[in-house]
Amino acid sequence: MKPLELTKEERSELEVLARSRRDWRTRDRSRTILMFSNGVPAKEIARRQELTLEAVYERRYRWLDKGMAGLSDAPRSGAPSKLSPEQVEQLKVWATQEALTAPELLARLEEKFGIRVHRNTLTGVLKRAGLVWKRTRHSLKKSGTNNGSDKPSLKSGHWSSKPSVAKSNSPT
């Protein structure tokens, strides 16, 4: 099989993608195409990249068919988001203004928008929005109010924005 012919622009862009692209799949595919352009046989590419021969040829065919666009993953199917951007924004506001638990946020969501989602959906949305779960520290002491139980009062926790990490130059 003859080597792939690349323009100078394609080669330089592939080299950049192969070195610095965050997505490892795109990096890997870029390296495959570069090896093909350097005349490396498909069996050798498969051995070096620990791929099947079919996967190596598939990358070559995608490159010939789609060029640079063939390096990225195709869009995945899946269920549409259960929460609209407006609802996600409202959840972020509630979670950052007050120390609310997940059940309290779910109740507010249902009250305001009439929508019910699973707790896992809520936590996933809040994590993707940059919020973190802060667990309230449980005290081993007895509760200040004696409710007839010797068990400590327990609080679960709340959502808050990620703390900014500030570097200090002063010695501690």
Image (tube, rainbow, N blue to C red):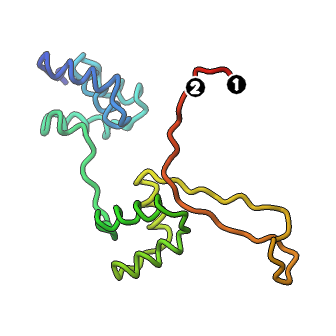
Residue reaching furthest to the front: 144
Q: Residue at x 85, y 69 (%)?
A: 142
Residue 145, above or below 13: below
Residue 130 seen in the figure: yes
The residue labelled by disc 1 is 172
Tag 1: residue type?
A: Thr
* Residue 116 badge: none
Residue 79 seen in the figure: no
Q: Foreground: 48 or 155?
A: 155
Residue 137 placed where, x, y %? 71, 58
Q: Foreground: 18 or 170?
A: 170
Q: Foreground: 36 or 164?
A: 164
* Residue 168 badge: 2
Residue 127 placed where, x, y %? 46, 55
Residue 38 placed where, x, y %? 24, 16
Residue 14, above or below 66: above
Q: Does dot 2 land on a helix, a strand or a loop?
A: loop
Number of residues whose C-alpha sits closer than 10 Å to that of mark 1, classed few (under 14), some (14–19) or many (20 or more)? few
Q: CA distance from mark 2 to mark 1?
A: 9 Å
Q: Residue at x 47, y 53 (%)?
A: 131
Q: Foreground: 65 or 132?
A: 132
Q: Residue at x 31, y 64 (%)?
A: 78
Q: Toward which corner of the image does residue 11 lie, by quadrant?
A: top left
Number of residues whose C-alpha sits closer than 10 Å to that of mark 2, classed few (under 14), some (14–19) or many (20 or more)? few
Cβ atoms at labels 2 and 1 below 8 Å apart: yes
Tag 2: residue type?
A: Ser
Q: Does dot 1 land on a helix, a strand or a loop?
A: loop
Screen quadrant of the C terminus: top right
